[in-house]
Amino acid sequence: MPEIKVKGMSCGHCAAAVTRALKNLPGISEVQVNLADGRVTYQSAGPVPPEELARVIKAAGYEVVSG
């Protein structure tokens, strides 16, 4: 599953907000958040543009960390 690093998550509410934001994108069916290391993995039907992932995560109040 593709993985992204997200900055600013610290609790279950944060994980739920990021999960909800990503699941609203077309094609994303499963999201797993690891709060300990800030990693988010997701299952998608096809490629999702990185800028689209960053946009919805930023709108939820968090930041995608590059690299």
Image (spheres, helix red, strand yellow):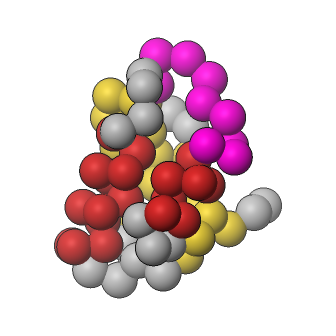
Q: Is residue 40 above or below residue 37?
A: above
Residue 29: percent from left, percent from top: 32, 28
Query: Measured along the vertical axis of the image, is residue 57 above or below residue 32?
Result: below
Magenta run includes residue 50: yes
Q: What's the residue at 29%, 50% (across, down)?
A: 20
Q: Most extreme residue toward the top, as rendered?
A: 45
Q: Quadrant of residue 36?
A: bottom left
**Magenta segment includes 61:** no
Image position of 67 (left or right of 14): right
Q: What percent of the width, then of the height, locates residue 19?
A: 32, 52
Residue at image location 41% in from the left, 77% down from the top: 9
Q: Which residues are magenta?
A: 44-52
Q: Is residue 37 visible to the viewer in this orientation of the structure?
A: no
Q: Quadrant of residue 13?
A: bottom left
Residue 29 falls left or right of residue 25: left
**Residue 31 coordinates in the image, percent (x, y):** 35, 43
Rendered residue at 61%/43% (across/down)? 52
Return the x and y of residue 16 as percentages of the image width and height. 24, 61
Number of marks: 0
Query: Looking at the picture, does residue 23 appear above or below residue 35?
Result: above
Residue at 31% of width from left, 72% of height from top?
A: 14
